[in-house]
Amino acid sequence: MTGGAGFIGSHLCDRLIARGDDVVCADNLITGQASNVEHLRGNPQFHFVQVDVSRPFAIDGPIDQIFHLASPASPRGYLEKPLETALVNSQGTQHALELAKRTGAKFLLASTSEAYGDPLVHPQPEDYWGNVNPIGMRSCYDEGKRFAEALTMIYVRQFNVDARIVRIFNCYGPRSDPRDGRIVPNFVTQALLGQPITVYGDGSQTRSLGYVSDLIDGLLRAMDTVDTIGRVYNLGNPDERSVLEFAQVIKRLAGSSSVIEFHPPISTDDPQRRCPDITRARRELGWEPRVPLEQGLLDTIAWFRIRLGLTTVPG
Ligand code: UDP
């Protein structure tokens, strides 16, 4: 797995190890964190290599599956590291695909709902081509991922690599980085610390938040289901809400007295609406999200309470 020390990658490491796999976790730790996989160190099924997959790298031994997750993924993460983001999605993806070609491993590219840009079709099905600003601040990420998708399809068509692509919609849960500036870490931290909850813009823009355990189920199904070579799947929860509504729900569930403040957006091109059409994943993978928003948020709030030192026992 590339990006195995990230928020999603570390949960995927846990699940693969629990089902008996040996996992090589490759990460350069620019946005991933060693603490996310600290509990796996010493486990004979787990092997950590600190490596930048944008540069050529070698992994010894037979490989059955490659999950390519490496990339900064939060707007703050990729706006701070635009070159690294563009390169890990271009050169890094090629290196991971070459490894799949050489070893015969199955391959999964973690792409993103950002591939749809600021969508003009709603909700977004996989065959929508998107509305992306190729020279905008976000292009290191959204165009980077679109290039990664194009490269993956070249390796499918030209070299018969057994690859599939998933487009991940906003994901949240325990281990999401409290400093990465995303909606859930920000709002939960602010609510728990009694700080103002910072809504960017008027809060009418929408997102659909998916809980991390549901996403991990979807990643495994996309990799393991037969006849998924060259297929693209949206993985997300279609429960669409406005950003203001997320602020209100999190404030309530955290039992917080924080005020909700409106701030200017931190980046241009903030997509106004985002919601996955998951018909294809339902039909072809037999997958759909199971964790309702409030349940997922309560679990996330409990983890943040510990992370922020507000309690030592899960709430
Ligand atoms: N957002 C917000 N306040 C915050 C963090 C995020 O209003 O403190 C908004 C952001 O402007 C966007 C949405 O929440 O409209 C989701 O932002 P996030 O950074 O989580 O991910 P994105 O979907 O933009 O990649």
Image (cartoon, grey):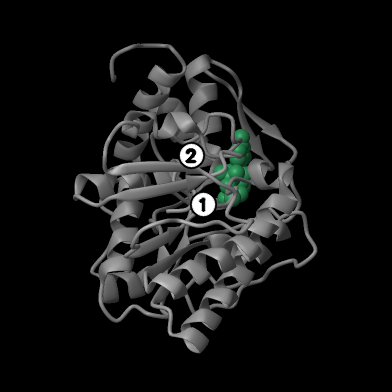
The front one of 104 and 280 is: 104
Mark 2 to mark 1 CA distance (whole Å): 9 Å
What secondary structure is found at the residue carrying circle 1?
A: strand
Quadrant of residue 31 in the image? Answer: top right
Q: Residue at x 47, y 19 (%)?
A: 192
Quadrant assignment for ligand 1: top right
Residue beneath disc 2: 246
Q: Amino acid at mark 1?
A: Arg
Of mark 2 and mark 1, the one earlier in the sequence is: 1
Q: State yes or no: Cβ of the residue under disc 2 lies below 8 Å from any atom of ligand 1.
A: yes
Report whether residue 234 is seen: yes
* Marker disc for residue 207: 1
Quarter containing the C terminus: top left
Q: State yes or no: Cβ of the residue under disc 1 lies below 8 Å from any atom of ligand 1.
A: yes
In the rendered image, the vertical position of residue 155 relative to residue 303, given as above or below: below
The front one of 288 and 159 is: 159
Residue 52 location (% of width, % of height): 60, 49
The front one of 258 and 178 is: 178
Q: Is residue 297 left or right of residue 85?
A: left
Residue 54 location (% of width, % of height): 63, 56
Q: Residue at x 62, y 57 (%)?
A: 88
Report whether residue 257 is seen: no
The front one of 236 and 246 is: 236
What secondary structure is found at the residue carrying circle 2?
A: helix
Q: Residue at x 46, y 41 (%)?
A: 5
**Residue furthest toward the front?**
60
Q: Residue at x 66, y 71 (%)?
A: 131
